[in-house]
Amino acid sequence: MLDNNVLHKKVKDILYSLTGITLAENKDIMISNRLHKLQRDTKYSGDINNLLNAIENGSYTIEFINSFTTNKTHFFREDFHFTDLKDRILPEFSKSGEEIKMYCSASSTGEEPYSMAMTVFEAQEETNRKISASILATDIDTNVLQYAANGVYRFSKSSKEFPEWIKPQKYFKKRVNKTLSTEEILIKVKPEVQRMVTFKVMNLNDSTYPHENNHFDVIFCRNVLIYFSSEDQNIILRKLFSHLKMGGTLYLGHSENPHDLINFVKRVGQNIFIKTKELH
Ligand SMILES: C[S@@+](CC[C@H](N)C(=O)[O-])C[C@H]1O[C@@H](n2cnc3c(N)ncnc32)[C@H](O)[C@@H]1O
């Protein structure tokens, strides 16, 4: 049996090499819990160190990655970003008739890209014109992508997730489920909202991304950089930036910063950046 320090160091090394995620020093309880989850998911009954050896040799990598990602998210998280999208960006596309191409680079269980889609529908109503929009949503975790593509969520009447300019009943259908408390219901995203979003698996740690250069008008990269070292955050941002059109907008999470991009963007709001120069 390996001692916990050695075991946890091994977990951190594997996680870093597979995903780029850097776990902080004080994560012992979390690592232990996730190792239990990993054993459950893989149904591996042997010694945990042997399981880690197998992962190092290329087995169970999906289960390992899915066990160690943190997927916390909710609809309209940091809602001022969606207000900015609705009021500043979408009216331009409504006027020009051009398709707006958006990218959600760590979409987790789907609340973020579906919030982007609902925002497009609201802007359409406000401007009284059809807006052509596509949203690519990627994540490294295949479980959350499956959940997202299914589009079924728990909703409670006391939930404050939706800003007052969104009426959830326009975008979701109620699902009957007897196992939930009376406070909670299940809701399913309507097909017209789902059709706007394409979910794909992608690792932000890959050396290149499968997107064209200067392709997206909008990139959401929120609450994922925090899991990477400062150096790796910068590397990811530089790669993402090459896929953003000149004049396109990058949204970052509340505690994230643009690193090297700072001299190549104009800040127009709280962690809202417009690309003004190409990065060399
Ligand atoms: C905390 S969630 C943030 C979700 C959403 N962007 C938000 O702001 O609510 C972080 C997500 O990043 C994903 N992630 C972590 N490392 C990744 C990587 N190397 N490549 C792609 N996605 C990654 C996780 O699987 C998780 O779903």
Image (cartoon, rainbow, N blue to C red):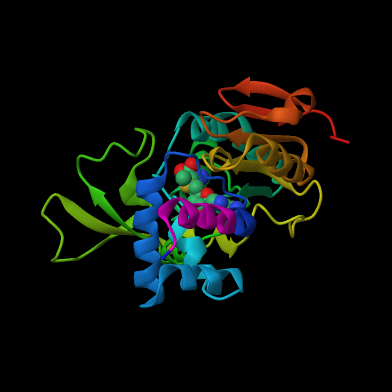
Left or right side of 61 for 153: left
Task: Name the residue located 52 percent from the left edge and 62 percent from the top edge.
Answer: 195
Task: Name the residue located 35 percent from the left edge and 39 percent from the top edge.
Answer: 162
Task: Name the residue located 34 percent from the left edge and 71 percent from the top edge.
Answer: 40
Instruction: Give how far across and how far down residue 7 sits, in percent.
Output: 47, 57
Tell which of 80 and 56 is nearer to you: 56
Does residue 121 appear in the picture of this structure?
no
Magenta stretch encompasses residue 133: no
Q: Quadrant of the C terminus?
A: top right
Residue extending farthest right: 280
- The magenta segment: 2-15
Left or right side of 53 for 152: left
Instruction: Give how far across and how far down residue 93 sits, in percent.
Output: 66, 40
- In this rendering, is residue 114 above or below 173? above
Does residue 68 appear in the picture of this structure?
yes
Residue extending farthest left: 182
Q: Quadrant of residue 2?
A: bottom left
Tell which of 39 and 157 is nearer to you: 39
Tell which of 232 and 157 is nearer to you: 232
Task: Name the residue located 37 percent from the left edge and 34 percent from the top edge.
Answer: 163
- In this rendering, is residue 183 above or below 246? below
Q: Quadrant of the N terminus?
A: bottom left
Magenta stretch encompasses residue 5: yes
